[in-house]
């Protein structure tokens, strides 16, 4: 009798929620909510995908089926806000990139194909030389020149002293110069 009793679910227990059906049932108004928050029809599909993933991946199941709609509403609002935050970061990055790499007057004047070809070849040789450096040297050079970090920032982020940054950069630059000289990219004057 005990085995039969434990296999019967309590009368107030709800089965697992069919999220596909619930999302389909609430899809139209949730899309309206999301659209009002993101303002772009293309973004609505992306946000709704995130809503569906979050609903399926939830850690604490909803016990009351009447609370599904309000929960989906809150989830949609949160996902829309996360999307807007992500787009804001992407927009800032793009703005920073376009500002940093805006063609200068000199760039506009030098449209010579030969100069472009030589610059591309030189870039390829520098990449090749960087590839032959020890990883510590390549790392500190890349952080210094691609991230535009100061010596102080490098020291803080890498957890080393300011003088260690100076010496590591000095040695890394020297090794890079040697590699570039071997590839005949630069002439070394001694």
Image (cartoon, rainbow, N blue to C red):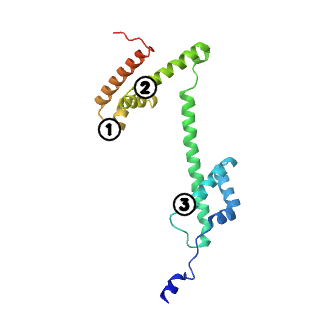
Q: Residue at x 57, y 30 (%)?
A: 98
Q: 84 and 1: which one is in front?
A: 1
Q: Which residue is mark 1?
A: 159
Mark 2 residue element: helix
User: Which type of secondary structure does the marked residue at label 3 adopt?
Assistant: loop
- Image location of residue 4, percent across then percent down: 52, 86
Residue located at (59% from left, 48% from top) = 84
Q: Which residue is mark 2?
A: 130
Residue at the extreme bottom of the image, as rendered: 1
Residue 159 drawn at (x, y percent)? 32, 38
1 or 2: tag closer to the N-terminus: 2
* Residue 57 marker: 3
- Give the mark toward the camera: 1 or 2: 2
Residue at image coords 50%, 64%: 59
Instruction: Mark 1: give few (<14), some (14-19) or many (20+) Cα within 10 Å.
Output: few
Tell me where residue 161 appears, x and y as whole percent.
29, 33
- Locate residue 72: give its quadrant: bottom right
- Check whether the beta carbons of the residues at disc 2 and disc 3 lie within 8 A of each other: no
Contact between marks 1 and 2 (CB within 8 A): the answer is: no
Tell me the element at label 1. loop
Residue 64: percent from left, percent from top: 58, 73
Is residue 76 among the parts visible in the rendering?
A: no
């Amino acid at each position: 009798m005990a085995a039969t009793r434990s296999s019967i679910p309590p009368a107030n227990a709800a089965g697992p929620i069919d999220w596909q059906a619930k999302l389909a049932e609430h899809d139209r108004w949730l899309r309206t909510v999301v659209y009002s928050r993101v303002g772009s029809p293309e973004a609505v599909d992306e946000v709704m995908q995130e809503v569906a993933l979050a609903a399926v991946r939830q850690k604490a199941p909803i016990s009351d089926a009447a609370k599904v709609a309000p929960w989906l509403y809150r989830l949609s609002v949160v996902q829309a806000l996360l999307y807007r935050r992500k787009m804001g970061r992407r927009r800032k990055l793009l703005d920073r990139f376009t500002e940093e790499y805006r063609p200068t007057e000199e760039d506009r004047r030098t449209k010579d194909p030969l100069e472009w070809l030589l610059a591309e070849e030189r870039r390829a040789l520098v990449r090749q030389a960087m590839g032959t450096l020890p990883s510590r040297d390549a790392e500190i050079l890349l952080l210094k020149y691609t991230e535009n970090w100061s010596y102080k920032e490098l020291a803080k982020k890498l957890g080393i002293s300011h003088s260690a940054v100076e010496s590591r950069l000095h040695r890394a630059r020297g090794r890079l110069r040697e590699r570039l000289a071997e590839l005949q990219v630069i002439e070394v004057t001694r």
